[in-house]
Image (cartoon, helix red, strand yellow):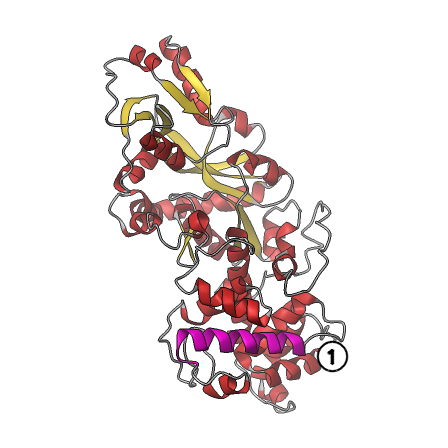
């Protein structure tokens, strides 16, 4: 798969892809292991505007989205959501990796796209005439009606449009729901009492505030209200505010070829039934996707929890001097947080450590969750230390260590020596040592190395997978966050 090629992770050369570049934040001072999140996610702060050719050259489709139950969320360490799955399928269609960018506020989506922070917005964005003056939109991904919602115990009756004037209605004055309210006033002649949602809260949070009595009424998409009701939120629709509105993806106005590719993909997705399947998965109240979105535990975007082993990762990471989120990313890549996993090679537990390796780092039982995490943390730190010096920067230290964690130290040292022979940089992983490692699958090359044949494709995919997973975890869970 595209993710398994490592074709877009980290520090790939994007010179030809960049039409504009903004300065990134200065490198933090301090220990590499304290600042690992900054070093390993530096590529996520790149700024460049890209059309289809540049997206393919960079090998990554950067997608702006929002954390909510319908678009994108992280549960039990895994990315999920309607927009996530659809954008992932589009990236697969293009043959690139997908990377999600979640800004602090929905109000930042358009500006960040125009600044080159991403290539596309996939966030249930309503396609309006005003927005089409700034952005280039695809065909609709779905449509949704807007309704006025209140608590079910609200005693005020609504039998006609004029009755809506009795409610204090909260809506973000920077959103299309505000324009929906203004259009409703123009069409019906009813004056609405409107209050601003100043913090830009998502619709599902606005509905939660209705349930708690903080808001009297809100304007939301009907399908989002349905999901909230299925999750047990006490809110009901009281009156429709207009016709269904188109929700679409948006790209930079100069990215016409990317928009055309997205349109072709969405047309095929509709024809093949993919859109219908994903809508049913996430917007039908009792569907599996909507139930997963309602999980209270391990929703990283809500409570900062990745797994039930976060405490182990934190303690082992602190003791070994490794970012605990990197340990979680390794465990997810190895076992999907399965503490009973065993490989045919004899590796055991969450971190898939061999008993012989565990003993070398002072752990006698790597099959227990604690033993596996402690052994994995100590071993990974030892590998990172090994690659220090010789011009290897902090990011490359970690990537070489991850490759060695998967394939063995000897194979990676072989590949670094091969990199010199084929004119690649032995101190860089992506596009350099990973290319040399591929040669160890060819008898003409691996016979000339000390450690012989290597399962290079597996290792290349592994490093990319852990890097991508760490990007997600670092974005959603601050390092300094207190344990849940």
Q: Nearer the viewer, residue 72 or 83?
A: 72
Classed neighbour count for the residue bearing mark 1: other residues with Cα under 10 Å, few (<14), some (14–19), many (≥20): some
- Helix or strand or loop: what does disc 1 sit on? helix
| Residue at point 30%, 40% (across, down) | 227
| Residue at point 66%, 76% (across, down) | 385
Q: Is residue 314 above or below residue 291?
A: below
| Residue at point 33%, 13% (across, down) | 166
Q: Nearer the viewer, residue 359 or 442?
A: 359
One can see residue 97 in this view? no
| Magenta span of residues | 366-386
In this view, which residue lies farthest toward the top? 189
Q: Is residue 482 above or below residue 372?
A: above
Q: Is residue 53 above or below residue 409?
A: above
Q: Quadrant of residue 427?
A: bottom right
Image coords of residue 143 (percent x, y): 36, 34
Decide whether residue 385 is among the magenta residues: yes
One can see residue 84 in this view? yes
Horizontal side of 451 relative to 334 (left or right) equals right
Q: Quadrant of residue 56?
A: bottom right
Horizontal side of 332 relative to 378 (left or right) equals left
Question: What residue sits right under mark 1 in the picture?
Answer: 420
Decide whether residue 320 is among the magenta residues: no
Image coords of residue 264 (percent x, y): 46, 45
């Amino acid at each position: 798969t595209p993710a398994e090629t490592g074709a877009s992770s980290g520090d790939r050369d994007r010179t030809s892809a960049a039409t504009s570049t903004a300065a990134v934040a200065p490198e933090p001072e301090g220990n590499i292991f304290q600042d690992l999140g900054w070093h390993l996610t530096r590529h996520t702060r790149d700024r460049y505007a890209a059309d289809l050719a540049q997206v393919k050259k960079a090998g990554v489709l950067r997608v702006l989205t929002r954390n909510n139950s319908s678009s994108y969320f992280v549960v039990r360490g895994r990315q999920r959501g309607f927009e996530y799955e659809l954008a992932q399928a589009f990236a697969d269609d293009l043959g690139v990796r997908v990377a999600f960018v979640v800004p602090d506020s929905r109000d930042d989506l358009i500006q960040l796209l125009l600044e080159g922070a991403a290539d596309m917005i996939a966030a249930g964005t309503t396609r309006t005439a005003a927005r089409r003056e700034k952005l280039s939109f695809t065909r609709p991904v779905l449509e949704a009606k807007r309704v006025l919602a209140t608590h079910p115990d609200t005693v005020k009756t609504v039998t006609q449009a004029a009755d809506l004037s009795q409610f204090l209605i909260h809506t973000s004055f920077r959103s299309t729901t505000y324009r929906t309210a203004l259009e409703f006033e123009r069409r019906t002649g009813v004056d609405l009492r409107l209050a601003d949602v100043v913090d830009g809260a998502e619709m599902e949070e606005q509905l939660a505030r209705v349930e708690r009595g903080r808001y009297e009424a809100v304007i939301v998409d009907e399908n989002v209200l349905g999901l909230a009701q299925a999750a047990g939120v006490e809110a009901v629709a009281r009156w429709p505010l207009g016709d269904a509105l188109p929700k679409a993806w948006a790209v930079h106005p100069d990215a016409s070829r990317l928009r055309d590719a997205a349109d072709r993909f969405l047309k095929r997705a509709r024809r093949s039934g993919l859109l219908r399947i994903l809508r049913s998965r996430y917007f039908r109240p009792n569907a599996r996707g909507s139930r997963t979105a309602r999980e209270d535990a391990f929703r990283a975007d809500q409570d900062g929890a990745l797994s039930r082993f976060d405490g182990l990762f934190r303690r082992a990471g602190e003791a070994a001097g490794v970012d605990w989120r990197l340990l979680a990313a390794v465990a997810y890549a190895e076992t999907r947080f399965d503490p009973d996993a065993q490989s045919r090679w004899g590796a055991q537990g969450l971190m898939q450590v061999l008993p012989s390796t565990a003993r070398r780092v002072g752990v006698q039982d790597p099959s227990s969750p604690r033993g596996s995490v402690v052994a994995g943390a100590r071993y990974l730190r030892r590998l990172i230390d090994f690659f220090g010096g010789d011009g290897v920067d902090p990011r490359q230290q970690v990537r070489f260590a991850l490759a060695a964690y998967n394939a063995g130290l000897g194979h990676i040292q072989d590949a670094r020596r091969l990199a010199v022979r084929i004119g690649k940089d032995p101190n860089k992983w992506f596009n350099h040592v990973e290319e040399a490692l591929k040669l160890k699958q060819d008898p003409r090359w691996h016979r000339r190395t000390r450690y012989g044949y290597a399962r290079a494709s597996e290792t290349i995919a592994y490093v990319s997978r852990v890097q991508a997973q760490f990007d997600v975890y670092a974005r959603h869970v601050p390092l300094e966050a207190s344990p849940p």
